[in-house]
Image (cartoon, rainbow, N blue to C red):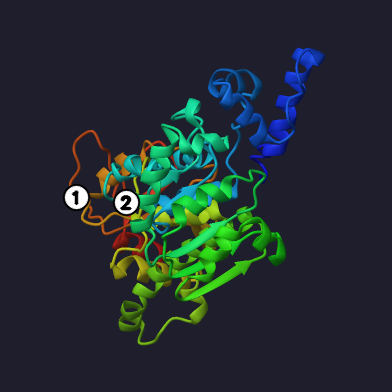
Amino acid sequence: MASPSSLPSAAAVAAAAKRQYDATYGVTRAPLPVEVEEQAEFFFQRGELATVYFRTLIDQNAFAGRPNHGHFAVADLLLVRSIQTAITTNVDALIETAGQWLLGQVGVGIDGIGVAALPPETAPLLKIHGCRVADPVNMIWALGQLTTEPVASRIASSGDWLRVRLLDRDLLIVGYWTDWDYLNNVLATTLDAVRPARVIVVDPADAAAFVEKAPVLYELGERATTGFRRVHASGSDFLAALRQAFSKSFIRRTLHLGILDYHDQTGGDPPVDWTEPPDLPNDVLWQVRRDLEGCTPTQPAQQRRPADEPLVGVTLLQLRAGGAVPDGSYWLLDGRRIRVLRAPNQPLHRVEIAFQRETAPIVAPDIVTVVGAEAQSLSPNVARAGTTPTIARGTAGLWMTRPEALQALGL
């Protein structure tokens, strides 16, 4: 529900459906119940949940919107497998949409069988209430669905899969608060035998409300083997901060990989503040991570940790030593913007050709330092710009190997 998604609550969805139903039938039929689960149960018992309630009374665009910071955080952390398993009770596709904006495909299933069939390197997203896109007629909205097919088998297979998947794991539960009272029944079934290591619950509600509204989650936290903690915060804000902390950790690891080589070259360690990542927005940190991974223009960030390659880190430290300061995802030195890109064992001209597909930035770098690439003799259709050790092309920016860039920048 956080902006800019601003999806309606269950109460708002129910109120809109009731207005439409009551306006259609007036006093010729009994008024539709107020609560969403009672409305859904009414149509489910009549065999009209999918054909009437979902199809005609629920706004078909109610679950569409722009992903918020929380969606982007979950998608990003799933794609790099920092979150190794995600379970959502939401039926919208905003996490998947966020993943596509991040150039990746989030692996999704609506039951244990579906997520188990995903590629082995995928961090799965289990949509335990179903999916508005994948299977719109069998979304779980009514209590009666839990004991009938196909939902009963879906819940059973999800529970079996989760019991193994979440054994001795740290669990982060974000936004347990719900207008759907029967949700605790679903969670009780699927999480009953899960034994977590640590449980962290994030929600702005107070502690007393948590115990009353979500007794299953409270009991789950109580049986955590190493700790149970509640964080009083917005789920979207917390997830955005978590994503930022992950990105900073990734960049910090990269910088620390270069300390030993920096010491060998200069005889001393860099100042501590040079080994700390800059404070930047999440989308900028994501781009920095992609460059430090060596992602091509169409690849998402996919690494939990940087490659063990000190040259990337020492290059950044040498830029800092020369007086460079952060400038978005670039470094600004003597009025020139420098981009540092990892491309081990690649011919320089092929790296540049690959990045010709990249969407042109608003402010282009003056120098792209390609760490790990080698300058080679080029094919006749690639022109050299005089004696300058770079490739000339129509767009701004000179592409250089690391030694070339260090020489050009006087480092």
**Residue at the spot 43% in from the left edge and 43% down from the top edge:** 155
Query: Is 196 rendered above or below residue 90?
Result: below
Residue 292 appearing in the image: yes
Q: Quadrant of the N terminus?
A: top right
Where is residue 403 drawn, in percent x and y?
29, 63
The kind of residue on which mark 2 rests is Thr
Badge 1 is on which residue? 376
Q: How far apart are labels 1 and 2 at the CA level?
A: 14 Å
Query: Is 120 rendered above or below residue 383?
Result: below
**Residue at the spot 39% in from the left edge and 45% down from the top edge:** 156
Q: Earlier in the sequence, mark 1 or mark 2?
A: 1
Quarter occupied by residue 107: top left
**Residue 388, labelled with which disc?**
2
Q: Say how many tags the image has.
A: 2
Viewer-nearest of labels 1 and 2? Answer: 1
Where is residue 292 drawn, in percent x and y?
38, 58
Q: Is residue 401 left or right of residue 97?
A: left
Where is residue 166 drawn, in percent x and y?
39, 60
Where is residue 267 drawn, in percent x and y?
35, 87
Q: Observer-nearest residue: 404 or 195?
A: 195
Residue 334 appearing in the image: no
The kind of residue on which mark 1 rests is Gln
Extreme-right residue of the structure: 27
